Amino acid sequence: MAPFPDNDFSLSAEPPIRRLLREMRRQWRRSVGSLLTRTGRTADTAQSTAAVPVEKRRHRRIPLKNTLVRVTDGCLCATAEIGDISPCGICLRNLPEQLYHSAGRLTVFSSDDPGLPVLHIEPRWQRTGWRGKTIGAAIVDVPEAWHLFFVRAAGGIGA
């Protein structure tokens, strides 16, 4: 360290960015240490439990990937992606905001997958994000073909 000529202040030969990073690391360790001592949990556990809301589900959810369906409220028709399914419910993602403002029922169908039956659903919740709207819905009068589709999808998880 070289002394500053006008006062007793010393400058380090270490680059400022390195000092900044070292100080940030020190502050981060201190904050994580206080978090661990207060809650007794690891940082990973605290982060994962805060990110995942506790859900009260009656049925197991089966995630589906790359399954597109058409959804209509009687006026508008849009393409959506199935997020997950259950024996009597479905989660649809990437819907436009205009769909289902006050519709009590929606119709879901697929022209690509003959195993997916036409479903009449009643939305239970909705969440709007930057990619569109996500809704969770209950299937009205669950058809037998839906049970077959669900069993086939559930069997494909382990394969």
Image: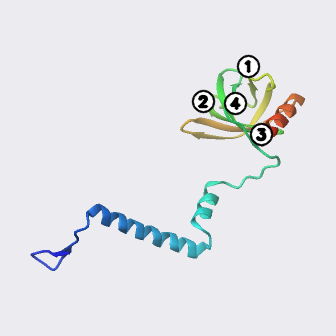
Amino acid type of disc 4? Thr
Instruction: From the image, state whether disc 2 or disc 3 is nearer to you.
Output: 3
Relative depth, front residue between 87 and 125 = 87
Residue lying farthest to the bottom in this orientation? 8
Quote the CA–CA distance across marks 4 and 2: 17 Å
Report which residue position mark 1 lands on: 111
Image location (x, y in percent) of residue 70: 69, 24
Residue lying farthest to the left in this orientation? 6
Report which residue position mark 3 lands on: 159
Question: Would you place residue 60 above or below residue 70 in this image?
Answer: below
Q: Is residue 18 left or right of residue 82?
A: left
Q: At numbered mark 4, what does the secondary structure look like: helix, strand or loop? A: loop
Cβ atoms at labels 1 and 4 below 8 Å apart:
no
Image location (x, y in percent) of residue 139: 81, 34
Amino acid type of disc 2? Pro
Report which residue position mark 2 lands on: 96
Q: Residues within 10 Å of mark 1 (few under 14, many from 20)?
A: few
Instruction: From the image, state whether disc 3 or disc 4 is nearer to you.
Output: 3
Instruction: From the image, state whether disc 2 or disc 1 is nearer to you.
Output: 1
> What's the mark number on residue 67?
4
Cβ atoms at labels 2 and 1 below 8 Å apart:
no
- Give the mark nearest the N terminus, 1 or 3: 1
Q: Residue at x 78, y 49 (%)?
A: 57
Relative depth, front residue between 22 and 8 = 22
Q: Is residue 155 left or right of residue 17?
A: right
- Give the mark nearest the N terminus, 2 or 3: 2
Quote the CA–CA distance across marks 2 and 1: 20 Å
Amino acid type of disc 1? Ser
- Give the mark nearest the N terminus, 4 or 2: 4
Q: Which quarter of the figure is the C terminus placed in?
A: top right
Cβ atoms at labels 1 and 3 below 8 Å apart:
no
Quote the CA–CA distance across marks 2 and 3: 33 Å
